[in-house]
Amino acid sequence: MKAQLKIRTCPTCGSGGIKKVKKDWKGEYQGKKYSVPSLSFYECPDCDERVYDRDAMRRIEEKSPALGKAYRKKAA
Ligand SMILES: [Zn+2]
């Protein structure tokens, strides 16, 4: 098992203020809005950069309208 992704500085602006947050995440894909409740990800207060670890990415993908169709097809 690999260690959990740890980020101390923002990859975009180099700020040390980036920190892990847990909140409702809202996204948009081709005009369709979707959200992921209580998502953990890193957020930079200086440039609004967001960094997602694998778990966060997976949860976003599960909610994404772009991929949701494929998931539903597989389940059917
Ligand atoms: Zn930043």
Image: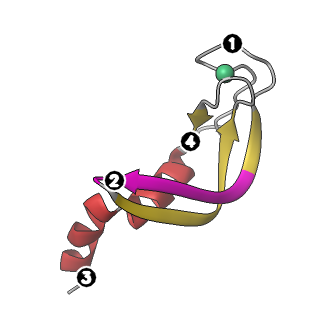
Q: Mark 4 or mark 2, which is nearer the start of the sequence? A: 2
The kind of secondary structure element at disc 3 is helix
Q: Mark 1 or mark 3, which is nearer the start of the sequence? A: 1
- Nearer to us: label 2 or label 1: 2
Image quarter of residue 15: top right
Instruction: Return the residue at label 1.
Output: 14
Q: Mark 3 or mark 4, which is nearer the start of the sequence? A: 4
Q: Mark 1 or mark 4, which is nearer the start of the sequence? A: 1
Instruction: Return the residue at label 2.
Output: 29
Q: Which residues are magenta?
A: 22-30
Q: Is mark 4 within 8 Å of ligand 1?
A: no
Magenta stretch encompasses residue 17: no
From what the image shows, is residue 52 above or below residue 62? above
Q: Is mark 1 within 8 Å of ligand 1?
A: yes
Instruction: Return the residue at label 4.
Output: 52
Q: Mark 1 or mark 2, which is nearer the start of the sequence? A: 1
From what the image shows, is residue 58 above or below residue 65? above
Q: Is residue 26 left or right of residue 39?
A: left
The kind of secondary structure element at disc 4 is loop
Q: CA distance from mark 2 to mark 4?
A: 17 Å
Instruction: Return the residue at label 3.
Output: 75
Q: Position of residue 29 (x, y in %)?
A: 34, 53
